[in-house]
Amino acid sequence: MKSWVEYWNSDHPIYVNERHRVLHYKLLARDLVALVPDTDSIVLDFGCGEALSADDLASHTRKLMLADAAPNVREKLGTRFNANSRITVLSDAEALALPEESVDLVILHSVAQYVPRADFPGLIEKLVAKLRDGGRIVLGDILPPDLPALTDALALIRFGFEGGFLGAAGIGLVHAALSDYRKLREDLGLTRYTAGEMLTLLEGMGLTARRLEQNPGHNQARMAFVGLKVAPLE
């Protein structure tokens, strides 16, 4: 495997069992719902992954667009949500070709770490261009520079304890240590940002930015930010 897209397009062991996978997306959808401005919002979830609970999120929107670079992921999303008229599945290219100022909320969760640092500002600029005045972009699961792998492991163990898959979480950590994921982390690395760097990036796009008190999902050692697009004064 030579890229993160290839990894996510494959059958990977990132979730220790089905209960972990289901609870992960259920919790994530619950937290993202709280960030939707109102039920008339058009939302783009860019790099959405399997998004098992996207119907929960969609029920709080006018339209939810799920975009992912992995073809196999998109095929599964299309099958799963084919009957939901509020959900549309897009490729990254299709999402980036959306009309400017057509979206109320862009979600970019657990994506930044897999994008090379040099490419990330350009991606954010393209996504911010999709926002209407008053629209928001949310960046979640941002890895700080000093976050050790052990902290992520402990967060999973805690989630496993609370979610009833503690034993599987322990076994899964061992499998992860021997998996392609660890090799890709070593070969490609994960991009990390300080809070200051992320705020500077968003503010440099003309957004009013702040760090959120809670990172969507179970891992509160990672960070989340929101940038608000303010209409220019006339």
Image: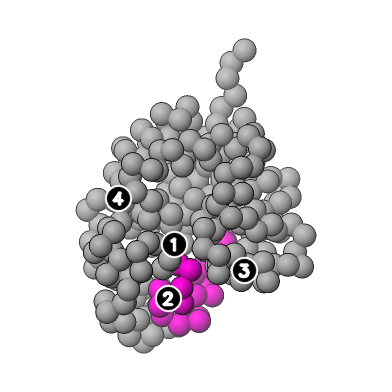
Give the residue type at disc 1: Val
- Residue under label 3, please give it: 75
Mark 3 vs 1: CB contact within 8 A: no
How crowded is the residue under tag 1: few (<14 C-alpha within 10 Å), some, or many (20+)?
some
Tell me whether circle 2 and circle 1 mark residues in contact (CB < 8 Å): no
Residue under the point 43% across and 66% down: 6
Magenta residue span? 8-31
> Callout 4, which amino acid?
Arg
Cα separation, mark 4 vs mark 1, equals: 18 Å
Q: Amino acid at mark 2?
A: His
Disc 4 crowd rating (10 Å Cα; few below 14, some 14-19, many 20+) is many
Determine whether 53 is above or below 169 in the image.
Answer: above
In front: mark 4 or mark 1?
1
Can you see residue 110? yes
Which residue in the structure is indicated by mark 2?
A: 12
On screen, residue 131 versus residue 1, left or right, reads right
User: What residue is rendered at 66% in x and 37% in y?
Assistant: 99
Q: Are marks 4 and 1 in contact (CB under 8 Å)?
A: no
User: Quick one: label 4 or label 2, which is nearer the N terminus?
Assistant: 2
**Residues tagged 4 and 2 counted as in contact (Cβ below 8 A):** no
Q: Residues within 10 Å of mark 3 (few under 14, many from 20)?
A: few
Determine which residue is flagged by label 4: 192
At 33% from the left and 41% from the top, the residue drawn is: 118
Mark 2 or 3, nearer chain start: 2
Report the side of 43 relative to 209 (left or right). right
Q: Which element carries disc 4, helix, strand or loop?
A: loop
